[in-house]
Amino acid sequence: FFNFLLVFIHYLAFLAVSVAIKLLLPFAVEVANLIEERLELPTLAIWWAAGTIVSAILAWLVFLIMLLKSFIWNIYQAVLVVIVTGDLIAQMEKDARQEADKTEDERA
């Protein structure tokens, strides 16, 4: 359950960041110019910072893909264990019933 929440929260956060980027992207050049004027930073430094942010978001996307892969694998393994365990329990109950029937037949 906690693994599901972790995946869900990461995907919601990534969705929020993606929507914010989509909404604010048309103003990127104006924001870069404003930062350059106010903080007196060179344009190259601002674009390096933007490139770093884009790289971080792409790395987060790769992390999310790996997180989803692990989540799906964990769900698959859990279902597989439940199926095998259910079959084993059914076989054990069947064997116990047969053993009980043999014991009753021997007493009779």
Image (spheres, rainbow, N blue to C red):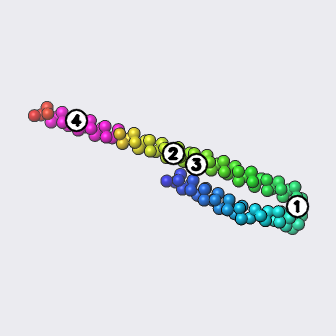
**Image location (x, y in percent) of residue 45:** 86, 56
Q: Report which quarter residue 38 is drawn in.
A: bottom right
Q: Is residue 32 above or below residue 102?
A: below
SS assignment at label 2 = helix
Depth-wise, is mark 3 or mark 1 nearer the camera? 3
Q: Is residue 13 above or below residue 99?
A: below
Residue 99 within the segment the image draws in magenta: yes
Viewer can see residue 39: no
In 3D space, how far apart are the residues under numbered discs 2 and 1 (Cα atoms)?
48 Å
Residue type at the position of mark 3: Leu
- Residue 98, labelled with which disc? 4
Which residue in the structure is indicated by mark 1?
41
In 3D space, how far apart are the residues under numbered discs 4 and 3 (Cα atoms)?
45 Å
Residue type at the position of mark 1: Leu
Q: Residue at x 83, y 56 (%)?
A: 47
Residue type at the position of mark 4: Gln
Looking at the rendering, in which quadrant would you find the C terminus? Answer: top left
Q: Report which quarter residue 39 is drawn in.
A: bottom right
Q: Would you say 77 lies left or right of 63 here?
A: left
Q: Residue at x 49, y 46 (%)?
A: 75
- Residue 74, labelled with which disc? 2
Residue 8 within the segment the image draws in magenta: no
The magenta-colored residue range is: 88-104
Which residue in the structure is indicated by mark 3?
68
- The residue closer to the viewer here, 58 or 39, is 58
In 3D space, how far apart are the residues under numbered discs 3 and 1 (Cα atoms)?
39 Å
Q: Is residue 92 above or below residue 30?
A: above
